[in-house]
Image (tube, grey):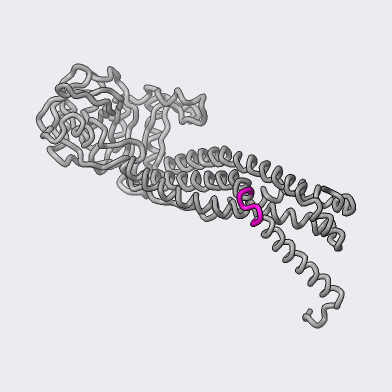
């Protein structure tokens, strides 16, 4: 239908409606400008809420991206065999500390007749304890493993060398320490060949790892690596492993390796029903999915907490708009006397409310962007990681939409109160 074919009455209605909206917007902006200080205080809650939401989502996405990148850096060919039932809730938390993985399991997984396509099988035991040298002490993670630990996690000694298979078999008192441990105990002096103490037992330092910074699940700068046999017998007093890491020869064989590992352990443990497994095998993809799920849940929780300030801000806006309606009673009466309908009055006050919250949303997104950028810089320095700045455009758009919606919802009541006023009584209002 062309413009010339539109009936004159319809065209007139469209034109009048457009003029009413333009006038309402102009009047709303003028009213807000006339009370700049009050308008600024009114939108403070909205600004804080949108800023907090933008910041939380940005930091959450940055953390998730960092952890996932570090997991991927380990390579897709790694599988972790963990003791106990796979946790599916808080009730299964205790299962993490099960002692179901023993030496016979390690030997069975290393046998190519049981599991094919495996490059390395590495046991791990760990505990947090205090190490000392001279008068210096440092609380750190004690990790017991074998010489393949450095190869699996691609972290080799910068000074000295790793311990050997002979050290593992002999339960030798040797250790490779992280750069932070060296700094805390030895400062700038050479650590190679010196002896530190762990639980009244002496360990000779044979290597020092290079600085790496925080990785996905541990910080190699803050660990002491010793033969797992030594850790089991002399430090922890256990005969089981906290985990066994299996490295497949290629990514293609990972599913088959996982299946054969499960079948081998079930046979050893006499398990016929997979639901009764006293172990679970996870791949890097499983770990990435789990981490992604956890960070998403935490982000959603924090966002919901931050969103409370939007409700508070909405209540504040409603109160201020009610005050504005009372102050402008004579103005409302004058508008009605000149032909303004209740719908026109209601629309004007709704526009003011929505405009207020939209401005607060824009300011909140800008502040959230700035604070997120600063947070990424600070976290990168504090955690010594390659924390990357992440800004979620969908979250920003959602924040603006929510801000406008808050203005609409909490502006409805004041707008209806204004629209219901009688023009005669409004003009008599002092």
Q: What quarter of the picture does the N terminus occupy?
A: bottom right
Residue at 77 percent of width and 50 percent of height = 415
Between 429 and 212, the one lying in front of the other is 429
Looking at this view, is 5 or 79 the one in front?
A: 5
Rendering quarter of residue 133: top left
Is the residue 133 above or below the residue 112 in the image?
Answer: above
Tell me where residue 137 appears, x and y as whole percent: 22, 24
Q: Residue 273, image x and y in percent?
A: 49, 28
Q: Which residue occupies 67% across, 48% down? A: 406
Is there any visible trace of residue 253 in the rendered image? Answer: no
- The span shown in magenta is 33-38
Magenta stretch contains residue 36: yes
Taking the view exactly as shown, the residue that stands out farthest to the right is 424
Overall secondary structure of the magenta section: helix
The residue at 85%/63% (across/down) is 338
Q: How many marks?
A: 0
Question: Is residue 309 something one can see in this rendering?
Answer: yes
Say above or below: 47 vs 203.
below
In percent of width and height, residue 390 lies at: 44, 51
Percent coordinates x, y for residue 246 in the rendering: 32, 38
The residue lying at 11 percent from left, 34 percent from top is 189
């Amino acid at each position: 239908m062309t413009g010339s074919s539109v009936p004159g009455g319809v065209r007139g209605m469209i034109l009048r409606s457009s003029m009413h909206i333009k006038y309402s917007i102009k009047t709303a902006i003028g009213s807000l400008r006339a009370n700049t200080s009050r308008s600024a205080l009114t939108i403070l809650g909205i600004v804080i809420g949108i800023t907090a939401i933008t910041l939380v989502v940005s930091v959450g996405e940055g953390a998730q991206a960092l952890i996932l990148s570090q997991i991927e850096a380990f390579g897709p060919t790694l599988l972790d065999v963990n003791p106990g039932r796979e946790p599916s809730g808080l009730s299964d938390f205790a299962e993490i500390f099960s002692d179901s993985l023993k030496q016979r399991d390690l030997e069975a997984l290393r046998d190519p007749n049981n599991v094919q396509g495996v490059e390395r099988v590495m046991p791990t035991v760990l505990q947090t304890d205090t190490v000392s040298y001279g008068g210096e002490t440092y609380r750190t993670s004690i990790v017991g493993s074998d010489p393949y630990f450095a190869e699996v996690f691609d972290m080799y000694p910068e000074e000295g060398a790793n311990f050997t298979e002979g050290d593992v078999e002999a339960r030798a008192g040797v250790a490779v320490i992280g750069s932070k441990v060296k700094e805390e105990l030895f400062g700038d002096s050479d650590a190679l060949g010196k002896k530190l103490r762990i639980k009244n037992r002496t360990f000779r330092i044979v290597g020092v790892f290079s600085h790496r910074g925080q990785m996905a699940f541990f910080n190699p700068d803050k660990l002491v690596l010793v033969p797992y046999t030594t850790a089991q017998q002399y430090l922890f007093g256990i005969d089981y492993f906290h985990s066994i890491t299996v490295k497949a020869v290629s990514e293609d064989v990972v599913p088959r390796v996982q299946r054969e590992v499960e079948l081998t352990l079930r046979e050893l443990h006499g398990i016929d029903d997979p639901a009764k497994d006293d172990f679970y095998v996870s791949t890097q993809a499983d770990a990435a999915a789990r981490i992604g799920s956890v960070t998403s849940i935490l982000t959603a929780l924090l966002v919901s907490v931050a969103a409370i300030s939007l409700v508070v801000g909405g209540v504040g806006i409603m109160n201020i708009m009610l005050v504005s309606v009372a102050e402008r009673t004579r103005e409302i009466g004058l508008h009605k006397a000149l032909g303004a309908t209740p719908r026109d009055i209601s629309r004007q006050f709704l526009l003011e409310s929505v405009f207020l919250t939209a401005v607060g949303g824009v300011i909140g997104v800008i502040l959230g962007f700035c604070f997120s950028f600063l947070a990424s810089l600070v976290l990168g320095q504090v955690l010594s990681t390659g924390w990357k700045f992440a800004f979620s455009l969908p979250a920003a758009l959602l924040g603006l939409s929510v801000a406008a919606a808050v203005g609409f919802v909490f502006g409805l009541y004041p707008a209806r109160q204004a629209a219901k006023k009688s023009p005669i009584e409004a003009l008599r209002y002092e």
